[in-house]
Amino acid sequence: MREFDGATPTAEIVAYVDHLRTLRDSGGDLVDLLPEQSPIYHGRAAGAAERLRGYILASFERTGLPDSAIAFVIEELEGGHNPYVIAAAAKAARGATTLPAQIVPLLLDAIERIRQSDDVVYFECAAPSGNAAQPATALMELFRTLAWLGPRASIALPSLKAMLECHPPAFSDAVRAEIENAVSALSRPSAAPSCCADEAMPARSVPSPQAPIEHIELQDQNGVVFKFDDFFAGRPSLLTFFYTRCINPNKCSLTITKLARVGRRADAGGLRGRINIAAVTYDPEFDLPRRLYLYGTNRGLVFDDRTRLLRTTGPFEPFRQCFDLGVGYGSTTVNQHRLDTLVLNGLGRPVASFARVQWREDDVLDALKSALTAGAA
Amino acid sequence: MDVKDYRKRYEADLAAHAASTAASLRPPGVAAAAAVVDATQQRLMEIKRVPSDRADLSKKIQALLATLGNEKEPTVVRLAALKALGAATFLGENFAPYHADYLNTLRQIARPGTDPQLCEAALGVLAAEKDPDTQKLLQRGLQDAKFALVPPAKALQLLSYDDHANISELALSLFNQTDDLGVKEAALRVLATDAKSQDLFAKLLEDKSQPVSLRTLSATGLNFLNPQRFADVARTIVMDDSESEDIRDSSLGALASAPDNRALQDDSGFHDRVKELGADNSLKDLSVAARRMIAKP
């Protein structure tokens, strides 16, 4: 793969991506450009980084979607908020040979999520040309993917028909034409099952700590300072990551809200005092204790000795490296990040990992209980 | 009275008022010019008309988009259409079918050659949407004045709508290069989102030779980024009788509003000085701020 970094002009990277689009089996090279911490995004504005990532993602429609890229598609459809990247994910899905069964509900969720923020999207060159005739919009791309799925997406038919029956119309004429097209594609008779391949998402391997972390200094929402091991060693922990300036409500804000819910359920299940519940900010320079306190409190988090929001007192980078976290930075703050949640054992080592897609509270609680049992054994 | 009747009567009154205003402005004997004024007034009245139902709303939004995108329309009419569309965006679901067209139309306007006022208004909406292409246009204009679509202070203000836009380095460079106080102020507002600006804010706040507006913005910025560091600098300023009363007053006000100022409350030297300031009737706002600080539990 060619060497790019955050200083490489976008046009140069786009030209390289365009070249990859013409090659067979270039999917792997494109996947290498997707992780948030990739050097190509370093130092770019969040909007510019997302635009570039969307452009790369959309390429899979032509090159074919490798299995290793499916999680990126699911992630955007599940929780993305930028219409451009969501549309790119929808296009990428059209390059797949098999897709997880949840793809249809995820497409419908994404439609609902961006219904009021639809925008024109261009994937033939990164800089939009104002002269293109009848440009597609993000919603149009989502409906085109449903049409591409055809009868395999037939469970979406009632929803699509309801969208067409809305009065006054809930979509523009151009989008309605795509819905009508999708309805007719989904209604075609087919011997195929009414869903996609019922494949579960590949589980993420548990990251092995890449660097020593036990002496990293942390500060909690009350300003108390301690070393990593002072808090995390001795009992299993739920550890997740966030930052208070995150602009996607489906990411950090939801993560801390879910953390608070897990805390309440852990208390009710008799786990109080036996586990740690913590989240560390990606943006420690900005997220000072008072901000952490307010962010957690406003999302229902009840702080105690074993439930804390944390910041590193020094740089976050050692933490990122240690747990192989998917986060990239512009010059001021985070520009992109994935969801990363870990369950640590009593030695502070990861024993379960939930990355990129939304974690379920039941799964996290089960992993915590398993870690407790293993620790006792 | 029926709401529809009331609306009709109100609109008729407005139209009559507009017509009489236009007539009074009319230069005698210039019939053609008067006709243009009348036509424009009518267009403005039509734009301001409230739709009667949802079907009418749909037609109205489409007409507004056409007006906004029509280069042959007078700027005042296009600006009115933009304002009306801005209000319509608050209709949420009802505006959703037109959102993509709206942004696309604005992008056609936000470019060189468009009337500057209209261009600035379009850039404002797109910047609020955190549109990456708009941010690129604005940054290009800040880096090279010949590409500027709006003045530098305005460009900085529009870019500051997105604290993920990565413009703190550019803002710092502009701050250091320019003598224009307005641009310096706009740059400081941008820098208040970057934790790395703390040293600059502390330096400006302590520097009595700086304009009051820059010192006040620095106080706000430092308090936002690092309240503890602000409290340390502000304490010195409040205690310093040679300081400007404005800066002392702002600093004390911010300290009094801090969620946790126990450290200062326990500082007997500071506490005694604030008491003295509160009792000093020769001071105005500073005395009031001091009494507020003392009264805080």
Image: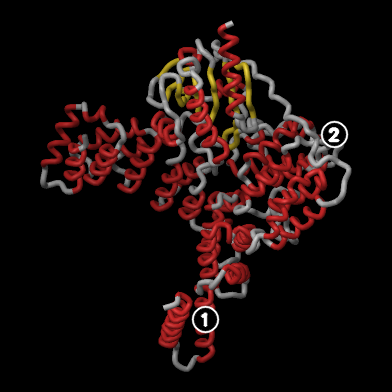
Disc 1 versus disc 2: distance between alpha carbons? 62 Å
Check disc 2: other Cα within 10 Å, few if <14, some if 14-19, many if 20+: some
Vertically, is B195 above or below A167? above
Check disc 1: other Cα within 10 Å, few if <14, some if 14-19, many if 20+: some
Q: Residue drawn at (51%, 21%), measured in percent from left and top?
A: A269
**Whether marks 1 and 2 lie on the same chain:** no
Q: Nearer the viewer, mark 1 or mark 2?
A: 1
The picture places residue A229, in percent across and down from the top left corner, at 49, 13
Which residue has dot 2 on it? A25
The picture places residue B276, in percent across and down from the top left corner, at 12, 37
Front in this rendered view, residue A51 or A72:
A72
Residue B57 appears in which quarter of the rendering?
bottom right
Q: Amino acid at mark 2?
A: Asp
Which residue has dot 1 on it? B42
The chain identifier of the residue carrying mark 2 reads A
Helix, strand or loop under label 1: helix
Q: Amino acid at mark 1?
A: Gln
Vertically, is B13 above or below A61? below
Q: Residue drawn at (61%, 34%), measured in percent from left and top?
A: A42
Front in this rendered view, residue A98 or A18:
A98
Q: What is the tally of numbered marks visible in this picture?
A: 2
Vertically, is A278 above or below B234? above
Q: Residue drawn at (74%, 55%), measured in percent from left and top?
A: A179
